[in-house]
Image: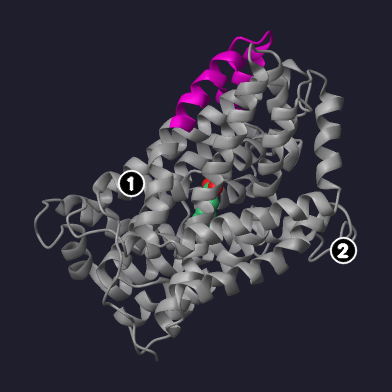
Amino acid sequence: MKKVLHQKREGFSSSIGVIAAVLGSAVGLGNIWKFPYVTGANGGAAFILVYLLCLALVGVPVMLSEHLIGRHTKANAVGAFKVLQPRRPWYLVGGAGVLSAFLIMAFYTTVAGWVYAYIFKAAGGALLSAKPEETTLVFNTLVSGVGEPLFWQIFVLLVIGTIIMAGVTKGIERVTKVLMPLLFILLVIIDIRSLTLPGAGEGLSFLFKPDFSKITIGVILAALGLAFFKLSVGMGAMITYGSYVNKSENLPKMAIKVALADTLVSLMAGIAIFPAVFAFGFKPNAGPSLLFITIPTVFNSMPFGRVFMSLFFVLTAIAATGAMLSLLEVPVAYLTEQYQWTRRKATMVTILGIGLLGSTATLSNSLFAKVTVFGKTFFDFYDFSTSNILLPVGGIFIALFVGWQWGYVNVKREMSNEGQLTNDRLVRIFMFLVEYIVPFAIALVLLAGLNIIHF
Ligand code: PHE
C-alpha cells in the first residue's frame, strides 16, 4: 500500500466556505433536472413524502458518516478506509465510489452540456415559445444531434478540469460561495410567475396532495436512489469533502442544514415546473426532457423572459458545475494521494476517461439509440445503475463500517469534536440509525425494488 500524503493538505478556509462547498456538491442538476422529472414519473406528492423519509432516515446519516470518516482520516475515499482498517478490504467501498463517480459523470456531463447549450439558445431567442410542440422540438433536435451535444460535453469537461486543477480552496470555494444565493433568488422569481399562471393549482396538487395508491416498491427505490444522488452520498464525495473540513465544525448540524437547504431548492424547482406542466398541457411523466421543454414556456409568459431565462440556465449551469467539481474531486484526490500523481495529471487522465465513457451517454439519442445494456440505453443505464444500485449499496457499507467497525467510541469522539460539543443523545440516535435502520432499510428496498425478493 502506498502511503497517504498528509503534509501540505489544503482545506476549506472558513465555515461558510465549507457549507457552501458541501451545499455546492449537493445542489445541482439533481434538484433542477432530476428531482422534477423523477417526481413527475413517479406520481407526485406521495413520492415526495417517501423521498423525504429516505432523506431523513438514510441520506442524512450516510452524509454524516462520510463527513466523520473523511475529517478524521483527512484522506480520499479509498485512503480513508485504508487508514482506519488497513487489514480488511473495506477500501473496496471507496473503490466502488471512484467507479460511481465515473459513471455519474458520464451522464451528468451530458445533461450539463444541454444546460450550457440552452444558455445560448435562450439568449438567442430560440426558446421563446408557449407551444409545447415547439419547445419539445428544440430539445429533441439538440439531443438527437451528434456534434452539438458532444461539443458541449467536452466544453463542460474542460471547464471543470480547469477549476479542479486550480486546487481546493481557491477553485471550489470561490466558485460556489457566490452562486448559491443567486440561484435561490432567481428560483423565487420563477416560482412567483409559475404560481400565477392560469391553471397553476393542478400542478400544486400534483406536488402536494398525496395519492398513496401510487406508491409501489419501484417508487420507493426511486425515492431512495434520488435521496442518495441528491445529497451526493454513497460514493465517497462527502468523505473527500469531509477531509477538507476543519476540526471545529459541528458536523451533525452541518449535515442537517445542508439537507434542509437542498430540499428547499428541489421543492422550489418543482414549484417552478409543475404548474407550467399542467397549465401548458405537458405530461408530468415526460422523463429527462421535462425541465428543458417546460421551463421555456414559463419564461415566455413573463416580462423580460429572455433575459431571465438566460440567467436561469447560467445559474443552473453553475450549480451543475459545483456538483461536478465534487464528483471529479473523488478520483482526482484518490489518484494524487494514493499514487502520488500530480493534480494536473490526475485531472487530465480522469477527464479523458469521463469524456470517452460520457460520449456513449451523449450519443444515446442518436448513434447509439438502439444499443442497450440490460434493456436500457447507455444514458439510462449509467443513471439507473448509480442512483438506484451503486450509491445505495455504497451507503449500506459506509453505514456498516461506521456503526460496526469504527464503533461508538470513535464516532462519539469525532462527532463531539473531541468532547467539545455535548451531543451524546444525537450520537446514540445516529449510531442506532447506522447500525440497524440504514443497512436493513436499504437492503430491503434494493432487493424488493430489483425484484430479487417478493412480498
Ligand atoms: N448531488 C448532485 C446533484 O444533485 C449530484 C452528485 C451526486 C454530486 C453524487 C456528487 C456525488 O446534482
Task: Indicate left or right for 24 with 143 as reference.
Answer: left
Percent coordinates x, y for residue 185 in the rendering: 46, 25
- Front residue of 33/127: it is 127
Determine which residue is flagged by label 1. Answer: 19
Determine which residue is flagged by label 2. Answer: 371
- Front residue of 344/129: it is 344
Is the residue marked by circle 2 packed among few (<14), some (14-19), or many (20+) residues within 10 Å?
few
Q: What's the residue at 75%, 59% (across, down)?
A: 361
Percent coordinates x, y for residue 90 in the rendering: 42, 80
Q: What's the residue at 78%, 18% (across, down)?
A: 130
Q: How far apart, in angstroms, are the residues tagged by discs 1 and 2?
A: 41 Å
- Front residue of 155/247: it is 155
Q: Give the vertical position of 192 relative to 329 (above or below).
A: above
Choose top left, top right, bottom left or bottom right for residue 278.
top right
Location of the C terminus by quadrant is bottom right
User: In the image, is residue 283 part of the stretch drawn in magenta?
Assistant: no
Q: What's under tag 1, amino acid-wise?
A: Ile
Location of the N terminus by quadrant is bottom left
Query: What span is colored magenta in the figure?
Result: 182-211
Q: What's under tag 2, amino acid-wise?
A: Val
